[in-house]
Image (spheres, rainbow, N blue to C red):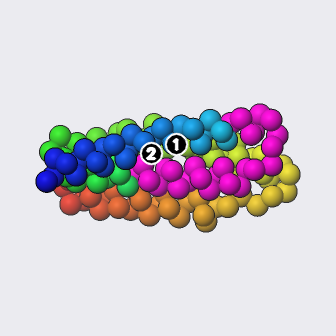
């Protein structure tokens, strides 16, 4: 039962990583082209980051091989890339006097990081 659940969550995690890559690439393209869909790109990237953190945390909970500390190590690089793209979107949006959706972007990421912290504290 757990093996099947692990493989399903792992597949979702990989699909989420692919989706995050596509969303991040799309965000960079719209930044380059000067298209005005920055808000939707920022929100989508934040939700994708939340999904990846949550599935990574679930993998650490149900896997004997993956621990929360391993997820944290990989998460640093992942969140740095997401933060760079989100930062570029924020700068561009401020440049055209459009409010960056801080709450909508940060809340899901912060919530999923809290879940990861709880898993780490519980020894997973």
Dot 2 falls on a residue whose secondary structure is helix
Q: Which residue is mark 1?
A: 20
Dot 1 falls on a residue whose secondary structure is helix
Along the viewing direction, whichever of 109 and 44 lies nearer the viewer = 44
Marks 1 and 2, how far apart in space? 6 Å
Along the viewing direction, whichever of 14 and 24 lies nearer the viewer = 14
Image: 33 above or below 124: above
Q: Are marks 1 and 2 in contact (CB under 8 Å)?
A: yes
The residue lying at 53 percent from left, 55 percent from top is 47
Residue 85: % across, % down: 63, 41
Left or right of residue 32, residue 42 in this image? left
Left or right of residue 32, residue 49 in this image? left
The residue lying at 80 percent from left, 35 percent from top is 33
Residue 19: % across, % down: 51, 42
Residue 95 seen in the current view: yes
State which quadrant residue 72 falls in. Answer: top left
State which quadrant residue 29 falls in. Answer: top right
Residue 7: % across, % down: 25, 44
Q: Which residue is mark 2?
A: 16
The residue lying at 34 percent from left, 56 percent from top is 116
Q: How many marks?
A: 2
Q: State the quadrant of the N terminus.
A: bottom left
- Which region is colored magenta? 28-53
Residue 41: % across, % down: 66, 49
State which quadrant residue 23 falls in. Answer: top right
Instruction: Say if the magenta span includes residue 15.
Output: no
Left or right of residue 42, residue 55 in this image? left
């Amino acid at each position: 039962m757990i093996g099947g659940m692990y493989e399903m969550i792992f597949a979702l995690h990989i699909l989420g990583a692919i989706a995050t890559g596509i969303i991040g690439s799309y965000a960079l393209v719209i930044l380059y082209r000067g298209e005005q869909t920055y808000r939707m790109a920022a929100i989508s990237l934040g939700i994708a980051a939340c999904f990846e953190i949550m599935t990574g945390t679930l993998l650490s909970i149900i896997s004997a091989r993956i621990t929360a500390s391993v997820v944290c190590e990989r998460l640093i690089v992942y969140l740095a890339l997401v933060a760079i793209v989100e930062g570029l979107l924020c700068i561009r949006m401020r440049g055209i006097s459009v409010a960056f959706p801080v709450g909508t972007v940060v809340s899901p990421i912060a919530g999923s990081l809290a879940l990861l912290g709880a898993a780490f504290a519980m020894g997973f």
